[in-house]
Amino acid sequence: MTPTGVVSTGLVQAPGWGLSTRPWGIDDAERTELLRALRFDWFKWDTYSAGHFTMIPEIMVVPEALHREVVEAVEGLSAALARLEARVHTDAAILDRLGIPRPLYPLLAREPQRSLQCARYDLFPCDDGRLMVSEFNEDVPGGFNETVGLPHLLGDAGRGCRWEAGLREALVAAFHDAESVALLYATAFSEDLQHMLILDRWFTETGRRTVRGSPAHLTQGRWGRGSWARGPWGRPRILGERIDAAFRFYPGEWMPRLPNFAVWERVGPGLPMMNPLRHMVRQSKKVFEVWREVMADDPETLSLLDAHAPRTVPFDPARIPEWQDEQPRWVLKRAFGRMGDAVVMGSLVTPKVWQEALGEARKKPAEWCIQECFQVTPLEFEAGRLFPTLGAFVVNGRFAGYYSRAAAQPFLTHEALHVATVVQDP
């Protein structure tokens, strides 16, 4: 649930992407019923926010060739991130550079490498012919309800088209060997609860027991059976319920603030969890800053970075005059943030706001980085020209469906609009 777009204001339509749009093709009564179903059957309560519809009543059509390129990109990036994580999750110097809270270092070091992953990578079709990604949502990637709900409600994808909405099946399969799953989320946020409710349904429909709660509810009972009984404590519990695995929808950087963090230090590394805390290596917006350096001997990774990653450099207070002079070229980012609260695009703010943001970063430079803008190719919708992103879910390293969005400004935050996405068969 972090901001995705870090792009410049270029509005030139670049040829070659082949993206197109078409309306939902339903009348007013059908649309009213669809929205009712989204709210009550799919827990998508925020179909309207601040008086505005949060979805575009159109479908974005992706050519098969572009779809294959998206799949290849996100699966390749996921594998490359796993290789990076394996190298650095015990390296305190690199974790420092990534801005990961130091109390988490022992947990990251002790967590085994597991396949459990639910991520979303937002790919931007750009004027230079590249699909660019500005960060990786490996912590709390939202959009479950719309990704599966809209294809179900809209039905037929259209002549020669198909939905790619396999997220439910991928997540259920990932927990095939767990009888009881804890759904851990930030309980103060209703938008997080709606994600947990849909997961709850999917898991219980396939015979798993679930318990919803906060990471603050983790305890460990005395005595137990199996591997959890090797020490003086038994299996982990959430609200008194024993659990085999967990789905974490709670920002990793918040974990050290938990009142039961000592329990997490003891129990967390042994708990199969999607997503593990070591994925904070991938979540940090500063990952591009260290990636090329750490993986200099990995040509596959370097090729992926050339194809999809913007130039990112450490925040150096000595370079502030340069960044002031080249304001439209740069984006200022904190290592961790939520819904755009720590991202400032030079091309979209006044010189005064940009100067103030650089001054704020100067106070704690290790927490910030500077990323180069890239020009996203706009797409024509009935509502006008918007900037799209092809959001691709990745579950256990494999593509698992689209959560695409578009916005009037070249900066995608919580105000960006969801757009249902289909693939055009060749």
Image (spheres, rainbow, N blue to C red):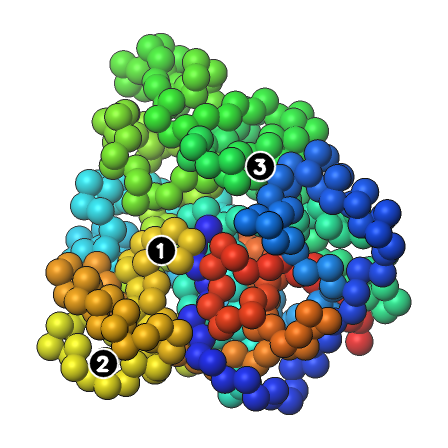
CA gap between label 3 and label 1 equals 22 Å
Q: CA distance from mark 1 to mark 2?
A: 21 Å
Q: Which amino acid type corresponds to the residue marked 2 in the rendered image? A: Gln
Q: Earlier in the sequence, mark 3 or mark 1?
A: 3
How many angstroms separate mark 2 from mark 3 (CA)? 41 Å
Q: Which mark is residue 324?
A: 2
Find residue 143 and report its horizontal and vertical position in percent. 58, 49
Element type at mark 3 = helix
> Which residue is identified by label 3?
194
**Can see residue 66?**
no
Q: Residue at x 17, y 67 (%)?
A: 359
Of callouts 1 and 2, the N-terminal one: 2
Mark 2 or 3: in front is 2
116 over 128 or under it: above or below: above
Disc 1 target residue? 341
Image quarter hosting the C terminus: bottom right
Q: What x and y, as percent, mark residue 14?
A: 60, 88
What amino acid type is highlighted by mark number 3? Gln
**Looking at this view, is 171 or 87 the one in front?**
171
Give the residue displayed 24% in from the left and 66% down from the top.
357
Q: Quadrant of residue 262?
A: top left
Front tag of 3 and 1 = 1
Q: Report x, y in % for residue 135.
A: 41, 64
Q: Residues within 10 Å of mark 1 (few under 14, many from 20)?
A: few
